[in-house]
Image (cartoon, grey):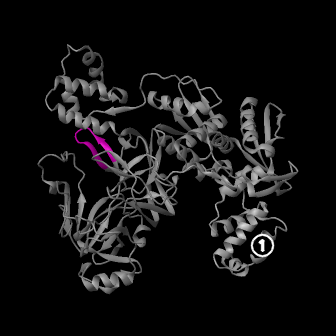
Amino acid sequence: MILSDFDLRNYIRTGRLKIIPFSNEIIRENGLDLRLGRSIARLKNIDSIFDIRGKIDVKKYYNVKAGDSFIIRPSERVLLHTLEYVKLPPELMGFVNLRSTYARLGLSIPPCLAEDTIVMDPVKGPLKAINAESVFSVDIESCNILHEKTRKYVSDYLGIMMKVRTKISEIVTTPNHRFIRFNPALTMEEAYASSLNEGDLLATVRTFSPSKTLVVPVLKPYPNLHVRVSDTLSSKIESKIREHGLTISETAKILGKHHKSYLINLLNNVYGVKWFFLEKVLRMLEIPVEKNLDEIVFYSRKAKKYLPLSTLYKRIDESLAYVIGYIVGDGGLSSIKSYKNVRLGLTDKNREQLEKVVNILRRKFDELADELTIERIERKYRVYIPTILTKTFSYNFGSGLRESRSREIPEKIRIAPNNIIASFIAGLFDAKGYSSNFTTYISTSSRVLAFQLQLLLLRLGIISRVVVKKTMWKRYQVIIQGKRNVEIFLNEICKYCSKPVRAKIKRETFDKIPLNFMLIEALKKLPHSDIEVRRKIDNYVYRRRVPYNKVGLVIKKLTEYKPTCYDMAIRDLLVLSKWFWDTVTHIEKMYYKEGKIVDWETTTQHYAAGVYVTHNTIIDGGFEGQLTIELIGGPFPVKLYAGERFIHVVFAKLTSPVEKPYTGKYQGQKGVTLPKL
C-alpha cells in the first residue's frame, strides 16, 4: 500500500517516520520531496585498480567537495546526499525517484527499464514491462530464480537511455541500471549500463520455472454468439433465482440495465440470447458452465442445424495449441463485405502442413469444419476457416491476429503448461520456421512476439538468440543453436512438428563458462601426466572458457588432484555455471521522448529483466540516515543548488514488518557516504 499525504503526516506526527529537519512543504500527494545537501563526490578518472578485496584508500578514487551549488557535467557520475536525515520504521520501505523537472533535463535516477521491454511475469507470462505486474526475483548467492510477490513502480521519463545489445538479446534501460558482469578478479560484479563495453560478459537467466498456478486454458465462444438453453437448464436457472430469494426484476437489476427482457426471453426460451449474458447469469447463480454445455445450443448456418455449445467451448490441448501457433505465424483475416462474414485464411507452399491443420480442425470442431477445403492459388495452397470459428479464434487469440508487425503471443498460451507451449511453438515453427544442418530458427516481423518467444523457450530450458534481419521489411529471427538447446528442441517440440528438423547435435560451441583468475591458477596446477588435463583442460585455460557440458569434467579433476584453493575454485565454477554468460556486442545512447520507465522492488534487490540479471535500489525497512544518491549527468551541464527539492520518495507499507530491520554498514550515514568494503 502506497502512503498518501494524510498517512505520511500521521506517521511523521507520531514519530514512526522521522524526517530531520522537517518542513511541511516537502509533503506531496503520495510521497516526500527531499532536498539537496551541501556535499558532492565526483568519481575520478584514474588508472589505479580498485581492488574490492584489497586494503585500499577509497577516498583517492573520489573528489569530495562542499558548496552551495554544483555543476553536473554530461554523462558524469556523482554522489549527492539529502539534507534530510530519515528514519524508517520496520513496516515501511521507500522508492527513490528523481523529480520530473530534473529528469526532463536528462539527469537520471533510479535504475529503470523502458516500458516496452519484454519481461517474464511469473503468472501472466512474457509481457511488456508496463503491463507486467510481477517479475522473477534472483538470489545471487544461491543462484535461484524465485517466484515472489514484487511491487511495480512506474514513472515518466525524458532523457538519455542505453540500448544494450548482446549476442542473444537486447534491452533498453536508464544509464544507471545495473547488470551482473563477469570480472576475472571478482567472479561477478555489478556494472552500470553506461559503463558497459563491447565484449563484456553479462549474466543471463538459464531457465524460468513456471508458476504453480498454471491451468490448462479454455477456448470459449465469442461473446455475441446467439445461444438457446434447454427446458432443463431454464428450469434450473429459475429455481436458482428462487433459492436466492430474488424476483426476475431484482435479478435483472443485479445483472445490469435493460437485462430484464433478456432474462425473460432466456427463461421462456422465446429466442436466443447472447452468450456473454448467459455466462454472466450462470456464474452469478453458481451454475457450473462446463457441466451444462450440452444443455446450451447455437445455430450453425454451415451445418444448417443447432449444435451443442461443447462444439466451441473446450479445453486447449496439444493439437489445438499447434493450430493456434500455426495461425499466429501464418494466419490473416479477410473481411467479406462486413465483419459478419469475416474469414481466417492460412496459406502455405506445403499442402501436407495445411492438411494437418485441417484434419485437427475437423476432429475438434466436427460439423463446423467438415466442409473445409484446400484451394490451389498460383504456387501456393490456401484454406479459409468458417466465420463462426474465425470469430471464436479472434476473441480468444486476438493479440496473435493483429497486423503482422504488432502481433503478440496470446495470453492463453503464455500462461499455459509447458506441453501446451511446446505444441504452440511447433505450430509457429511449421508456419514460419526453418532448419538447416547447423541452425534452427523461427522468423517473425513482430519485435514483441520474437522476445516473448525467447522467454517462452527459456521456460522450456532453451537458450535462443534474437537476430534482426534488415531486408525490405525488418524481420526478427529466433535462432536455436548449441547441443543442449537443440536436444531439448528435438525432444520437447519436434514431436509436434510436421517440418523435418535437420539440425545436427554437434559438440557444445554456444554455451561457455568464463574462468576467473583463481580457477585458472588452480587448473594450471593439475598434473600434465593426465591426458585429459593435457588435451582438454589446458585448452580451457588458454581460452579462459570451459564448455558448459564439460563443467563436470573440470570439477572431477579438481576434486581428484586437489590443487591449492581447489575448493574455492569449485565454488566459483559452480556459481558461474548457473548463469549463461552473454557477450555485449553493441552499446548505443538513445534519447527517450516522454516515455514511461518501470522498476520493481524485490526481496533480493535483483530481478530478471528480460533474460538479464539486474539490480534495483530501495530504502529498506528500519534504515536511518541521510540518503546518498547516485546521479548521472544528461546531454548538457546542469547546475544544482543546495536546499532545492530534487528527489521524490514514495513510501510503501509492507504486508508485515520486517523481522530483521536494516542494520547494515550504511546505517546512520551522514553527508556523502563513499563505498564501504
Q: Answer whether residue 185 is visible to the viewer in this image.
A: yes
Q: In the picture provided, is 467 more to the left or to the right than 208?
A: right
> Residue 470 at what x, y percent from top left?
60, 40
Q: In the picture provided, is 673 more to the left or to the right than 76?
A: left
The residue that mark 1 highlights is: 262
Q: Main secondary structure of the magenta part?
A: strand
Quadrant holding the N terminus: bottom left
Q: Residues within 10 Å of mark 1 (few under 14, many from 20)?
A: some
**For the point 76% across and 73% down, which residue is it?**
263
**Magenta residue check for 484:** no
Q: Answer whether residue 68 is visible to the viewer in this image.
A: no
> Residue 368 at what x, y percent from top left?
80, 46
Report the front residue among 262 and 92: 262
Q: In the picture provided, is 370 more to the left or to the right than 133?
A: right
**Quarter where residue 98 is shown:** bottom left
**Magenta residue check for 186:** yes
> Residue 264 at what x, y percent from top left?
79, 74
**Quarter where residue 63 is shown:** bottom left
> Residue 300 at what x, y percent from top left?
83, 52
Which structural element holds mark 1? helix
**For the point 24% across and 65% down, which residue is it?**
659
Report the front residue among 22 and 563: 563
Q: Amino acid at mark 1?
A: Tyr
Report the front residue among 600 and 276: 276
Q: Is residue 303 above or below residue 491?
A: below
**For the point 60% across and 49% down, which residue is it?**
409
The stretch of residues the image draws in magenta is: 180-190
